[in-house]
Image (spheres, helix red, strand yellow):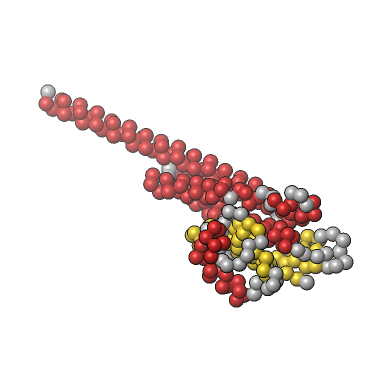
């Protein structure tokens, strides 16, 4: 048997509570931040995360398209970056242990708990792809200003635009911090050694922890650049104020001399 899995980043976030209410299918498990459906009569599985990722298992193109159209009604800030990841699960009764590969995993037999762990890790991987894109955009834009400092010795960006840029950086970082839980191990692995081992193998396979550390490092670089830009802007503003003070003093002296 083969189960096809696909994870897609659809939006920045979903309203999970409202989606659960309107999506009239029995919930297998979930929380305020995620919901997992096991529609075994149709041999379909669905995992929705509040950080804007949907993971499908055994959905054909039509069913997937219909679900995406439906769930967009509960989305905030749709993402148009074509971020997705495909994976598959195979079963082999002769296996004695799980075999994890880059594009697939093989089990002696599969149940909903195994599917949840696999789909969870694929969803995490796609979410990290999205944050990597955002962070790379921030680094690219900061390089432009650094190059300007190197070549001209000053920044042409206005205070308003710099503040907007700072706000964008902080928004991305806060979004990542808010979703730090995506790296947490799910509750169902705590008392099941086999699921715990599978979860660890998949995290290594998708480089979940390594990629997050790299993401955090890149954000730190951007923050350091922001500090530099802010200091340069403060110096520029201070210099401008000094000239204003000098001009006012000169005018006051000129007026005093004139009337004297």
The quarter of the picture where the N terminus appears is: bottom right
Q: Relative to 171, is 90 on the left or the right?
A: right
Of 168 and 78, nearer the camera is 78
Tell me: residue 237, above or below residue 1.
above
Residue at 37% of width from left, 37% of height from top? 237
Of 19 and 149, nearer the camera is 19
Residue at 57% of width from left, 70% of height from top? 67
Q: Quadrant of residue 41?
A: bottom right
Does the rendering let one see residue 74?
A: yes
Q: Residue furthest top?
A: 260
Q: Relative to 139, is 241 on the left or the right?
A: left
Residue at 68% of width from left, 57% of height from top? 121
Tell me where residue 115 appears, x and y as whole percent.
72, 62
Tell me where residue 176 appears, x and y as whole percent.
57, 49
Tell me: residue 126, above or below residue 225.
below
Tell me where residue 58 appears, x and y as whole percent.
68, 71
The quarter of the picture where the C terminus appears is: top left
Tell me where residue 222 appears, x and y as whole percent.
54, 45
Residue at 63% of width from left, 52% of height from top? 182
Q: Relative to 229, is 217 on the left or the right?
A: right
Does the rendering let one see residue 139?
A: no
């Amino acid at each position: 048997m083969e189960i096809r899995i696909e994870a897609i980043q659809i939006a920045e976030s979903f309203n999970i509570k409202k989606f659960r209410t309107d999506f009239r299918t029995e919930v297998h498990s979930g929380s305020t931040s995620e919901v997992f459906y096991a529609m075994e009569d149709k041999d379909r599985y669905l995992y929705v995360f509040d950080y804007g990722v949907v993971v499908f298992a055994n959905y054909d193109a039509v069913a997937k398209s219909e679900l995406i159209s439906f769930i967009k009604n509960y989305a905030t800030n749709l993402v148009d970056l074509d971020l997705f990841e495909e994976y598959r699960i195979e079963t082999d009764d002769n296996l004695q242990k799980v075999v994890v590969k880059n594009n697939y995993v093989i089990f002696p037999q599969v149940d909903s708990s195994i599917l949840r762990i696999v789909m969870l890790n694929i969803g995490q991987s796609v979410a990290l792809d999205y944050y990597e894109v955002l962070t790379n955009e921030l680094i690219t834009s900061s390089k432009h200003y650094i190059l300007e400092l190197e070549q001209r010795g000053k920044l042409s960006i206005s205070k308003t635009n710099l503040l907007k840029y700072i706000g964008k950086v902080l928004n991305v970082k806060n979004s990542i911090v808010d979703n730090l839980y995506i790296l947490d191990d799910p509750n169902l692995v705590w008392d099941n050694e086999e699921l715990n081992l599978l979860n660890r193998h998949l995290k290594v396979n998708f480089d979940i922890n390594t990629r997050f550390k790299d993401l955090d490092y890149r954000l730190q670089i951007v923050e350091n650049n922001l500090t530099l830009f802010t200091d340069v802007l403060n110096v520029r503003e201070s210099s401008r104020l000094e000239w204003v003070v000098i001009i006012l003093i000169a005018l006051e002296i000129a007026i005093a001399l004139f009337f004297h």
